[in-house]
Image (tube, helix red, strand yellow):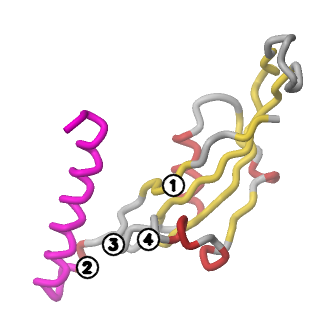
Amino acid sequence: MNRRSFPILKRRLFWTIREREVKSSPNAMAKIAVTTPYYVTICVLFEKPVALDADSRQPSMLHGYYRHFGLSAANRDEAQILVETEVQEGAIQWDDCQWEDIENLTPDIRQKIPPYSEPGVWHRSGSMFF
């Protein structure tokens, strides 16, 4: 077993235990945080443009990136706070971000939504630079 598989096994064990608690106790649902799944495409602008290698076929300067996040939170304000903790460089341009309806997502992304979720991120895409 490698080090990367440990968090996955730990997460599976947590949800297995949590599901057993819910099934075994009528009051267990009250112990679980009530969250809503959210999916957002964010736009991040770097403080200063980043220069690329002059020999590449890509643009010579990067100004920012787009990235998708799937997360569970009590409300949209909490969801924004969770996304802000994920962004380490640049500033999120909330006016240029798009919140998606969960029902419109592809099945492979929807299946990542945990059944009993505490607030947190359950999907991160790669960055699409511009």
x and y, in percent, of residue 114 in the image: 39, 68
**Span shown in magenta:** 1-28
Say which quadrant the N terminus sits in. Answer: top left
Q: Nearer the viewer, mark 2 or mark 1?
A: 1
CB under 8 Å between discs 2 and 1: no
Does residue 75 sit above or below 9 in this rendering? Answer: below
* CA distance for labels 2 and 1: 26 Å
Helix, strand or loop at mark 2: helix
How packed is label 3: few (under 14 Cα within 10 Å), some, or many (20 or more)?
some
x and y, in percent, of residue 103 in the image: 62, 79
Q: Nearer the viewer, mark 4 or mark 1?
A: 1
Name the kind of residue labelled 3 in the image.
Tyr
Compare marks 3 and 4 and give the one earlier in the sequence: 4
How packed is label 2: few (under 14 Cα within 10 Å), some, or many (20 or more)?
few
Compare marks 3 and 2 and give the one earlier in the sequence: 2
Does residue 50 sit above or below 110 in this rendering? Answer: above
Compare marks 3 and 1 and give the one earlier in the sequence: 3
Name the kind of residue labelled 2 in the image.
Ala
CB under 8 Å between discs 4 and 2: no
* CA distance for labels 3 and 4: 8 Å
Compare marks 2 and 1 and give the one earlier in the sequence: 2
Residue linked to disc 2: 30
Report the disc number at residue 123: 1
Does residue 92 sit above or below 102 in this rendering? Answer: above
x and y, in percent, of residue 9 in the image: 22, 51
Report the disc number at residue 35: 4
